[in-house]
Amino acid sequence: MKKLLYLVCVFVSLPVQSQDERKIFVDSLLTGVEVKKDIRYNTLDRPLLLDIYYPQRENNELLPCVMWIHGGGLTDNSIQKNYDIVRWGIARIVKQGFINISIDYRLITERQLPTAIQDCETAIRFIKSHAGQYGIDTNRIAVVGESAGGYLAGFCSFAGNSDIFSTKEWNHHSGKIACGVLWYPAISHPPYNMIDYISPGDVPVISIHGDRDTMVPIDQSYQIRNKCQENGLDFQLHVIQGADHGFFHKRWDFEANYRTYMEEAIEITIDFLKKNL
């Protein structure tokens, strides 16, 4: 609990001017991108919403889909599906021909785990249930999560081929995906440790982590790698030299450091998605 609460500090400490600079840049990347906002994906409890970002489409061909899960330590309600780090990745990847979806989920301040994990699984099954309506190829769905979102994306990747976190919603479809991308992922929040759900037959996964991460030490990605290797899984770990949590640099410099780290992570993500979707 303390670890995930601590993760929020990195976002709070970022100067407001720097956040504005990032938002202006990300908004410019998304100019002209078609977005369908605030689509409800659950049927029980309070509404949970997602946004869909479309690449340019010339026909009715079903397209691969990337579902994004934002971070925030599972506690920060100021970080939502329109978080700039998520939209930055979306802006680059949507132009590669992928449909992108960003979701909200219930934080532990509202409902304890495994609710957030179940919400992510519900969103995947919703996507499959409405794939024809939204133009999605159900065999080519990936998840990308950052920080606490990486923790949740890990469960989507390693437990998606089971019904452990299934609910009654859209349960005529499975939560299985094609691959997962974890950005600087936390691995544990009591009593759920992502590593406990890694088993033979899980989908390909990549973790991208800064070697200067002071919020979620890079050792956590090494722990994921080791368990995946024990189970004979397709797992990659890419280390970004000099990057802190969120791919920040200890001294804020948008052009010289932060933007460079983010673009590196996004390019690695794109390569991985193209290979596996």
Image: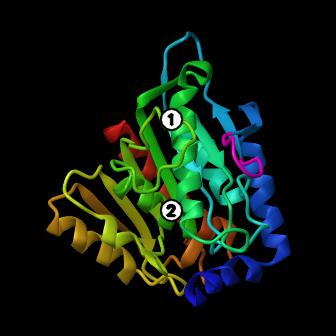
Q: Does the magenta stretch include residue 185?
A: no
| Left/right of residue 200 with respect to residue 91 in the rendered view | left
Can residue 98 be spotted in the picture? no
Say which quadrant the N terminus sits in. Answer: bottom right
Residue at the location (33% across, 47% down)?
161
Front one among 271 and 207: 207
Residue 185 at x, y = what percent?
47, 70
Identify residue for label 1. Answer: 65
Label 1 residue SS: strand
- Mark 1 burial class by Cα count in 10 Å: few <14, some 14-19, many 20+: many
| Left/right of residue 163 with respect to residue 36 in the rendered view | left
- The magenta segment is 41-48
Residue 65 at x, y = what percent?
50, 35
Can residue 210 be spotted in the picture? yes
Q: Is residue 36 above or below residue 207?
A: above
Front one among 19 and 1: 1
| Left/right of residue 239 with respect to residue 120 in the rendered view | left
Q: What residue type is labelled 2?
A: Leu
Label 2 residue SS: helix
Seen as rendered, the residue at the extreme top is 59
Nearest to the eye among marks 2 and 1: give it.
Answer: 2
Q: Which amino acid does label 1 sit on?
A: Cys
Badge number at residue 152:
2
Q: In this view, does 164 lie above or below 95?
A: below
CA separation, marks 2 and 1? 17 Å
Residue at the location (59% across, 62% down)?
115
User: Which mark is first along the chain, 1 or 2?
Assistant: 1
Say which quadrant the C terminus sits in. Answer: top left
Residue 160 at x, y = what percent?
39, 50
Magenta region's main secondary structure? loop
Seen as rendered, the residue at the extreme front is 168
- The reply to whether callout 2 and callout 1 are in contact (CB within 8 Å) is no
